[in-house]
Structure formats: C-alpha cells, structure tokens
C-alpha cells in the first residue's frame, strides 16, 4: 500500500509540473464560467464545482460565475401554482413568473452557489459574492422582440415574451473592483437585469455570460452544459471549431436543438473580443481543470 500511495504522490507532482505552462498562460486572466443545467441540480456535483472554481482562483485566474436556473424556476412555478405559457418552446414571462424567477435566481440559487464557494475556499479566505444584473447597474437590458411566421398567411408577427430582456449595456465597475481587491472574491451573477425605466427582466444566462465575457475582455468563456461538447455526424466530439465552422455546423444540421443557441452565444462572445469559448460537460467533475490545464482539453473550443 505504501508504494502505491508513493506512486500516486509522484503522479500528482508530475501532473502539477505539466500544468505549469497552462497556469502561466492564464495568470491574472479573467475566465467567465456559465454554470447551469443538470450539473446544478445535484448538490455533490455543485460542491465539486465550487471547489474547482476556488482552485482556479488560487492558481491566479479571475473566475466569474454566471448561473442559470430554468429547471428550478419551473419547479417553483409549479409549487406556487403559476401557469406558464410557451410560444415556440420559449416561456412567456408575465409579472407573476418574473417575481418567482427573480426569487429563485437572485435569491435561492445565487446565494447557494456563493456560499458553496465561500465554504470551499474558507481556509484561504476565498469568498463568493452573489450579485444580479440589478446590482451597481451591472446589466441594463432592453426588451427582447421575437417574430414568427403565421403558418397560414406567412406573415411575420411580433411575439411578446413578456419580461424577457437582453443586455444592452454592461457596467463592469463592480466586478472589476471585486477582482482587483486585495482579498480573493469570486463574483457569482444571476441573469436578471433592469431596463432604463427600472423594470426587472429575466435574461438568458448564456447570453449574460457572453455579454459579460466580452465586456470583461475575458481570455476564456466556459459554457458548462449537459453534453460532452459539439458532436460531429458520427457522434464524435469536435475538439476545435472556428466561428465559420460553427456557422456551417448550424447550416448543415450537424448542430441541432439546444446546441444551436450555445454556438450562437459562443460566436457572439468571440466576436465581442473573447479569445475562445469552450462548450463542455459540466456534469463531469474537474472538466474545467482538464480543459484549462491539460493539452487534451475536454470540450469543443470555438475561436476566431
């Protein structure tokens, strides 16, 4: 047993040494992490995520976490007896739905993730700080307008999704203050914003992550999902794609369903100045570490 344990010690040391070039690459660089889906529902997986985020901070990176909460919002709407309407698969956010969404996102989920990070980093005084786009004018939104073709007349009609917004302006002052502080803070951001008139809006969390990553000149944006990355026609993971290849994958029908908006978010973030966006499986423990600190990577990287 002793020899085996010793071997593991040497293997760990080798791994750390091999990670050095990557650690230097990311030193003092901002990495925006979009965290959501089923990876968030399981507490043990969520606590591992918090530990990995603390490790990123200890290794000299500046992680910024943006979280979603669709399944949790649906569960709370059911409990509250609020009926949802959907148009083309998109939930209409009326006033009652918005109230519940804000409670779940800015209240329950946001503070829980921030607290897990604080617990995971307690010995080194790394602290999670929960914010929403309403804090310090972080995210100013405008109402989303969508159109759909009427199947009978082929006329484009405007679809009203209610209080659903998209980022119009990002004020990163509060995040930069936290990242440049003498103490170690990890911002955790709920995808809620406010219009210039002061109305609260729900925002797609992937969109928030992309807009923040662009505004913060992030080196990387990690989109943690429920799949291994973008798969080709034969079901194999594509390790890298250019923006043009990602566009082609959507046009050819290689990327389908929920992967299309993820690729669109990734392309928009790269075009906004993020060096690269990685779509990876958030359910796998340490997926972020494999992606950032090994030559193998663990998802699909989209870059210029």
Image: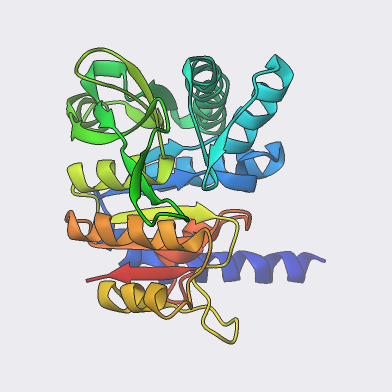
Indicate whether 226 appears above or below 246.
above
Give the percent coordinates (x, y) of residue 252. 42, 81
Give the percent coordinates (x, y) of residue 113. 53, 30
Give the percent coordinates (x, y) of residue 82. 65, 19
Give the percent coordinates (x, y) of residue 49. 56, 44
Q: Is residue 44 left or right of residue 299?
A: right
Residue sitting at x 19%, y 60%? 271
Q: Quadrant of the C terminus?
A: bottom left
Residue 58 shows in the view: no
Q: Quadrant of the N terminus?
A: bottom right
Asked whether 26 or 283 is in front, the reply is 283
Asked whether 284 or 126 is in front, the reply is 284
Indicate whether 288 appears above or below 165.
below
Q: Is residue 233 left or right of residue 137?
A: right
Residue 190 shows in the view: yes
Indicate whether 30 appears above or below 152.
above
Asked whether 42 or 227 is in front, the reply is 227
Residue sitting at x 66%, y 67%? 8
Asked whether 37 or 197 is in front, the reply is 197
Residue sitting at x 64%, y 46%? 38
- The residue positioned farthest toward the right in the image shown: 1
């Amino acid at each position: 047993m002793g020899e085996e344990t010793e071997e593991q010690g040497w293997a760990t040391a080798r791994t750390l040494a091999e990670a050095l070039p990557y650690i230097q690459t990311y030193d003092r660089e901002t990495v925006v992490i979009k965290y959501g889906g089923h990876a968030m529902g399981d507490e043990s997986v969520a606590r591992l995520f918090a530990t990995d985020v603390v490790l990123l901070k200890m290794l000299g990176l500046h992680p910024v976490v943006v979280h979603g909460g669709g399944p949790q919002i649906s569960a709370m709407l059911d409990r509250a007896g609020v009926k949802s309407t959907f148009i083309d698969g998109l939930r209409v956010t009326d006033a009652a739905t918005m109230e519940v969404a804000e409670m779940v996102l800015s209240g329950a989920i946001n503070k829980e993730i921030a607290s897990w990070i604080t617990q995971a980093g307690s010995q080194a005084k790394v602290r999670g700080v929960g914010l929403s786009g309403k804090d310090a004018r972080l995210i100013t939104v405008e109402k989303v307008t969508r159109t759909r073709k009427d199947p009978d007349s082929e006329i484009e009609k405007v679809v009203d999704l209610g209080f659903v917004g998209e980022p119009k302006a990002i004020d990163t002052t509060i995040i930069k203050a936290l990242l440049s502080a003498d103490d170690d803070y990890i911002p955790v951001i709920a995808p809620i914003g406010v219009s210039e008139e002061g109305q609260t809006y729900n925002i797609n969390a992937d969109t928030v992550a992309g807009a923040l990553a662009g505004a913060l000149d992030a080196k990387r944006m990690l989109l943690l999902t429920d799949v291994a990355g973008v798969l080709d026609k034969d079901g194999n993971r594509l390790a890298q794609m250019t923006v043009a290849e990602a566009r082609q994958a959507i046009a050819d029908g290689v990327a389908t369903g929920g992967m299309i908006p993820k690729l669109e978010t990734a392309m928009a973030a790269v075009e906004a100045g993020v060096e690269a966006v990685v779509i990876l499986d958030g359910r796998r423990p340490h997926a972020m570490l494999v992606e950032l600190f090994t030559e193998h990577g663990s998802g699909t990287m989209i870059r210029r």
